[in-house]
Amino acid sequence: MTVQEPLPTAEPQTTLPDPVPLTGCPYKANPYPLYERMREAGPVHRVLFPSGVQAWLVTGYEAAHAALNDDRLGKNHDRGNDRWRARASIMPEPQHSQLQVHLLHQDPPQHTHMRRFVTDAFTPRRIEQLRPRFQELADTLVDALPETGHADLVTGFAAHFPFQVLAAVIGLPAELASRFDRDWGKVVQPVGPTDPGRPAYEARLHGLQSYIADIVAHKREHGDDDLLSRLVAARDHDELSQEELDSMIFQLLVAGQEPVTNQITTALIALFRHPGQLARLRDNPDLLPRAVEELLRYDSAFELTTWRFFDQDSDLHGTEVPSGDSVIVSLCAANRDPRRFPDPDTLDFERSPNPHLAFGHGIHFCPGAALARTELQIALGTLLTRLPGLHLAIRDEDIQWIPAVLGRGTNHLPVGYDRRR
């Protein structure tokens, strides 16, 4: 197996600060040495985010798995205390109330009620039936790349493929899909209330809200047997509130495609760092399902989960967490825990079993997991097959990782290749 090249890391420290700052380019480039130190020191740590908000981070696999299934921890933002709310990078009002009552921020029984509207659209059987259409979309994007030389695989492929696939799955008509501004996807990278980028962030919110209103109006007039039409019909039959409808469409549009864009980039970067594994995967397409699972474990685009809260002061693996403080699970730290995964820093396509937590666990397990897996298999298989000699065209240390608090990925991935097949 190819040994990964050393990456830039933060300066070594003998003890962990309290709180542990999750900030800076070295951390975003390679958070795993810090996560290793945190796991060794204990499963729960107080951390500090760039916005100034403090939270409790769960880092080990067993602790993460337990937290993801802990029914004492709720996702509804109403549980957050004033200390958290004062600095949390959450949407301003009225958008927070209008767009943030989706599945990620709901607890049972409302979560159970809302989730049933989306699960049928993302079943493994339906996704497999759509695989030929997804392959056509991938091939069309590769056809548009230069025949030889260089390309940016984000702007040329990864930024478009997941959204085109999503549009096909949820029933977003072509005329509306063509109007979607990828910049709106940055609303999943919220900025704090005092950040100078807050006005631009709020402008994205307004643009996305207007777009969602147009989708609802279109589907109300031209309903069909698709997910978006069924959601609008549920609103018209008072099975969903207007806020729940808008929030669920918001979640589909943003959480349904931007993380897959980022996961394509993290997977490609991992392969570029392991050229032997890249060549093996290119020559053995049957490895793709196992390889995708390992790439999801190795470097997940969902680095951290969204907030969770106790409704009373509670013990969390030996740490007393005050009511309303935010609790976050580090999926990436859990997926590199050596107590669960032997040689966790090794990219091993033969790893079995591979119970990674890249899609979460429990009632909030990602409903689009089957779709994301299929997209990754098609994206990687198509790029490796049709672009022989594919390699990173910049130095590894020049990769600019997105500054998102919860996710990993890059907005630009310059590559070179011999020719386009």
Image (tube, helix red, strand yellow):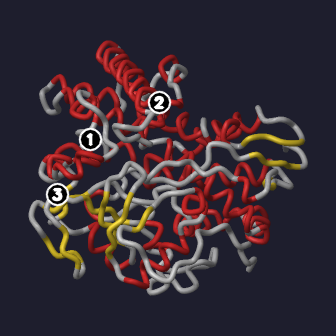
Q: Is mark 3 on a helix, strand or loop?
A: loop
- Which circle marks residue 102 in the picture? 1
As displayed, is residue 267 above or below residue 237? below
Residue 406 in view: yes
The three-letter amino acid code for the residue at tag 3 is Gly
Position of 61 with respect to 149 (left or right) is left
Q: Which of label 3 and label 1 is nearer to you?
A: 3
Mark 2 sits on what residue?
184
User: Within 10 angstroms of label 2, few (less than 14), some, or many (20 or more) residues?
Assistant: some
Q: Are marks 2 and 3 in contact (CB under 8 Å)?
A: no
The mark that comes first in sequence, 2 or 3, is 2
Which residue is under mark 3? 324
In the displayed structure, 416 sits above or below 22; it is above
CB under 8 Å between discs 1 and 2: no
Few, some or many residues within 10 Å of mark 1 (<14, 14–19, 20+): many
The span from disc 2 to disc 3 (Cα, nearest Å) is: 30 Å
Pointer 3: residues within 10 angstroms few (<14), some, or many (20+)? many
On residue 339, which mark appears?
none
